[in-house]
Amino acid sequence: MKKIVIVAMVAVLGLTACGKRGAPNPPEGVESTYPKSYPKPETLPRQQ
C-alpha cells in the first residue's frame, strides 16, 4: 500500500509540471521573425 501511495504522489507531482504558460513572446526591442516557411526557398534545388 505504501508503494502505491508513493507512486501516485510521484505521478501527481510529475504532472503538475505540465501546466501551460502564456504564449512565448520575443524579448523587448526584438522583432518577431515567426512564422517562417521551412526549408528556406533559397536553399531548395532549382527545378529545370
Image (tube, helix red, strand yellow):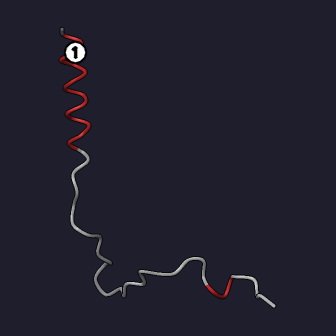
On-image quarter of the N terminus: top left
Q: In the drawing, does residue 25 fall left or right of residue 12?
A: right
Q: Position of residue 7 (x, y in %)?
A: 25, 21
- Which residue is label 1 attached to? 4
Q: Position of residue 35 (x, y in %)?
A: 42, 80
Say if 24 sits above or below 35 in the image: above
Which residue is at a point 21% across and 35% down the rendered structure image? 13
Say if 11 sits above or below 31 in the image: above
Query: Total of numbered circles in the picture?
Result: 1
On-image quarter of the C terminus: bottom right
Which residue is at a point 37% across and 84% down the rendered structure image? 32
Q: Position of residue 40 (x, y in %)?
A: 60, 82
Q: Quadrant of residue 34?
A: bottom left
> 48 or 30: which is nearer to us?
48
Which residue is at a point 25% across and 30% down the rendered structure image? 11
Say if 39 sits above or below 30 in the image: above
The kind of residue tagged 1 is Ile
Q: Quadrant of residue 39?
A: bottom right
Q: In the drawing, does residue 35 fall left or right of residue 5?
A: right
Extreme right residue here?
48
Extreme top residue here?
1
Q: In the drawing, does residue 18 fall left or right of residue 42?
A: left
Say if 11 sits above or below 40 in the image: above
Q: Residues within 10 Å of mark 1 (few under 14, many from 20)?
A: few
Extreme front residue here?
48
Secondary structure, mark 1, is helix
> 23 or 28: which is nearer to us?
23
